[in-house]
Image (cartoon, rainbow, N blue to C red):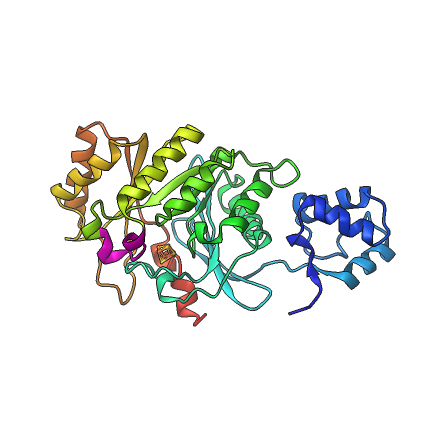
Amino acid sequence: MSSKADIRTFSAEELTEEIIKLGEPKFRAKQMHEWLWKKSARSFEEMTNLSKEFRTKLADHFTLLPVTENIVQKSKDGTVKLGMMLPDNRLIEGVMIPDEDRSTACVSSQVGCSLSCSFCATGFLKRERNLEAGEIYDQVVLLNKYALEHNGKPLTNIVYMGMGEPLLNYDNVLKSIRLITSPEGLNMAQKRITVSTSGIARGIARMADEGMKFNMALSLHAATNEKRNTIMDINQSNKIEEVMAALKYFYSKTGNKVTFEYILFNNFNDSPEDAEHLLKLYQQVPAFINIIEYNNVEGVDLKKAKSEQRDAFVNYLRNKGVDVAVRRSRGKDIDAACGQLANKNGK
Ligand code: SF4
């Protein structure tokens, strides 16, 4: 890797300082910022309203390291999965999920993951590093192209639900959200963004204090500590009660309902008793529940729940007045569950 500074790691203020240090007028920093974020420039040469001399100067002092498309998989159902190469030759994944009224991007926040949830293909990959804010941003830009091409509409929603635990890359994730939602960036509404966490209580509470309006989802998948401990190690140090307290705090600060993500696994968390435990959590904080169909993963014992069990589970919740949706698994034919592509490619 180059020893030159990566220009996209600077804040707007830092960028101004750097440009002044190069002996250039302040307004150049504004132009630069626009090229870097609003126009998503992938090289200094592209910045055609800057003089050739200035562009050379920039290239002498800084690097601009965009994420590049590497593998494109298109599912019969319209889902597009992108394997994207980082400047240090590591592979990450992002998915564009088309629907009638929306295009959703699922983005990664880390290369691999340190948490090893037992059902997750990414959990088999060791955590190699955090993604920079610009690398998260690039995924959105690249996936947006596919949203336009394949769904006729730009991205409407972004979920931080790909590889990695976003709250363990707190600063860069927050920075990326600020960039994506800023008028100088992609200008997306904060309420269209959801950060999905495995349950880092401290991180949830900290995000609540950032004065932002994005959504928080909890990958719950089991509604008692006893059961959750067996599939998600993070629950040993962040018990459901602590995470619930953080979610209540998040709601109190943002006014945004929280989402419980609950993958239904056959004979593991799909009984009437499990539904009752889930209901008890739902009743503690204004929330939605997403019941997610599992994409079976090679080498994982947990399997997708049977459709009769799923229907009974969902009906139980509906009859209790729960705001619940079923998310069908998408992109089954293209390994759309995060981590599957990188696993197969030995990254
Ligand atoms: S589910 Fe999320 S937190 Fe758990 S191993 Fe997979 S990527 Fe990491």
Place of residue 214 in the rendered image (x, y in percent of width and height, measured from the top left):
47, 36
Please identify the quadrant where the N terminus is shown.
bottom right
Foreground pick, 271 / 20: 20
- On the question of residue 72 being in view, the answer is no
Number of numbered discs present? 0
The x and y percentages for residue 195 are: 43, 44
Look at the image and say whether residue 282 sits in the magenta stretch.
no
- Tell which of 62 and 34 is nearer to you: 62
Question: Relative to residue 217, is residue 319 depicted above or below?
Answer: above
Q: In this view, does 255 lie to the left or right of 227?
A: right
Q: Position of residue 310 (x, y in %)?
A: 19, 44
- Which of the 4 image quarters holds residue 104? top left
Q: In this view, does 340 lie above or below 245?
A: below
Ligand 1 is found in the corner quadrant, namely: bottom left
Viewer-side residue, 334 vs 233: 233
* Quadrant containing the C terminus in the rendered view: bottom left
Look at the image and tell me whether residue 203 can be seen. yes
Residue 129: percent from the left, percent from the top?
50, 63
Which residue is at 47% across, 51% downward?
107
Q: In which quarter of the image is residue 187?
A: top right
Q: Is the magenta stretch mostly helix, strand or loop?
A: helix
Task: Write the start and end of the magenta stretch as one range.
Answer: 228-237
Relative to 285, 125 lies left or right: right
Residue occupying the point 17% across, 53% down: 268
